[in-house]
Image (cartoon, grey):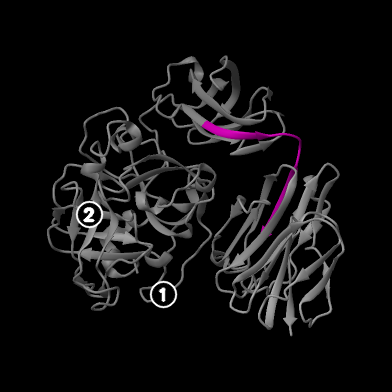
Amino acid sequence: NTVCSEGDNWRNQIRSSVRISVVGNDGLGYCSGTLINNTLEDCTPYILSAEHCTEGGVTASEFNQWVFLFNYSSSTCAGTTGPTNQFVSGCKKVSESNDNNGDAGSDFLLLRLNTLPPSAYNVYYSGWDHSNTAATSGVGIHHPEGDITKISTFTHTATSQSWGDTVPNTHWQITWSNTSNGWGVSEPGSSGSAMYNQNGFVVGHLTGGNSCCTLNGCGIGSSPFGLDLFGKLAFDWASNGVTPEYQLGPWLDPENTGATTLSGMDPPCGGSIQYDAGMQAISLPGAEICGTTFNPVITIRNFGSNILTTIVISYFVDNGAIQQQQWTGTLNPGNTINVTLGQLTLSTGVHTIAVSTSLPNNHADNNTNNDLQILNFTVYPGTGNVNLFFSTDNKGSQSTWQITDGSNNIVASGGPFVDATGGRQYNYPLCLPSGCYKFTVFDSNSDGMHNGEDGDFSLTGPGGTPVYFSLGTPAFGAQEEHNFCIDATGINEVTPVEFSVTPNPSTGLFAIAFNTGESKTLKVFDAIGRLVNEKQFSGTNYQLNLSGQSKGVYLVAITSPRGTSVKKLVLE
């Protein structure tokens, strides 16, 4: 644990470490990351991690569901738990190595948090060194398997190596050392964590390796002496690509000072910059919005040292005409304020909005690197608004949810959440066009949301009423499903098609009667799961002929937009 004596010389750097709850096309998981400084020292909330944490693809909407947990550390050297109430949700990808997870590069990922870590979190912006000078000793600070913050120590000089064997000198290679409280290694979940050199500077980020607590315990060849490889900041800087989206340097040294090292720092920031009004976020729209007419909402931050009383805001949509409005008020250094922009009326589909700030207090902005935010979003027709209220149990990290459409595409999802005594409450405003959907809640421990404080959820209309469906029982096991449809008349929870089968058992002919005549699909499976019959049809009656099949037990599944119902058939 980082509170042990091994962490005594690294107390600042430990405050930079974050556990990242990752959401992507390949599912859910954990990585590690580091809050890192830039030469403007303006507290831009950059997180450095590993590109392979996005393996399989991550959409902008999924990045907005990532959760960054700070100070997840034990208070004792032998402790196993830590506080889970200091987190920031959502981020945007700034740049990456684009190298197939380190096979042809240094495997870096740079993110920007959607919101600044609150001052109560007491975070630290770590310094860095991209000089390509081998560390003679140092540490790794990480969250193995999503665990509390751990520290691993190396006492031998790092060597220059390649991860993918196609591009040389992309990584630092080290072996870990035995220390007074144990032998630090790395595990899945440590990916992306910082490698610090003997001077306390970040010089790399973990891609992977063969370190393990026991000989061959993590595969053949793994051991406490196993080699770990960290992507080099020296390679990140400009060697993965020729544009800023594949480089680290333009973001951590935005004014191109040429610095090879930068010290870490504590907030507040901007003490050397007088006039610096910057865009913190575009709050509305999000990734999607219901209705073609709305007012964008932005968040502006005073990154400078002077109180701001006027700021010029410029914005445009889809390369259209630039619109301007002036904000007036009082904005103290380090504080933020939400500003509502003029009304927009847009067609349905995908759009882009760009918003920038300028002329704080009628002065030239001393730092233009944080002035612009660009957002891609989708406009859906009509209102179609619903709200999902979701409350976790004490083990929020075990809970996830998703909504799928009639083609089984995931249209909305959430979790995993943080572990917190008493649970946490979340509200998701959702924009769902007309159609039928399935809501599914999952529990990775297969015991439902029934740990300590019982969890709960409900889908409601705008304003919170009526409730279209809610949790059946907290102890639902691995998952619980609800089917619902949205049409011109509103939203209704639906149940799968009901049907009866007679006679059953039968020598071959089964008469099936349905309670509804809507379109549906019938599938029959034998006892070992082979599909033996399939038919699409409408109506309330159907005669199923299995006389050509072997005697035994079969399953008939009836699927419609309402869901799937299954019954057992016996063929004599």
- The x and y percentages for residue 37 are 33, 42
Q: Counting other residues with Cα less than 10 Å from the Cα at mark 1, is it few (<14), some (14-19), or many (20 or more)?
A: few
Q: State yes or no: residue 72 in magenta.
A: no
Q: Which mark is residue 428?
A: none
Q: Nearer the viewer, residue 275 or 128?
A: 128
Residue 408 visible from this viewpoint: yes
Q: Mark 1: which amino acid? A: Gly
Which region of the structure is painted magenta? 375-391
Gap in angstroms between the C-alphas marked 2 and 1? 34 Å
Q: Circle 1 sits on which residue? A: 79
Quarter of the picture containing the C terminus is: bottom right
**Going by the picture, which residue comes out furthest to the front?**
548
Which x, y percent locates residue 102? 28, 50
Badge 2 element: loop
Q: Quadrant of residue 399?
A: bottom right
Residue that mark 2 sits on: 163
Can residue 201 be seen here? no
Q: Residue at x 66, y 36 (%)?
A: 289
**For the N terminus, which image quadrant?**
bottom left
Q: Is residue 449 left or right of residue 238?
A: right
Q: Label 2 neighbourhood size at 10 Å, few (<14), some (14-19), many (20+)?
A: many
Specify whether residue 378 is painted magenta. Answer: yes
Q: Position of residue 562 (x, y in %)?
A: 76, 58
Most common secondary structure along the magenta stretch? strand
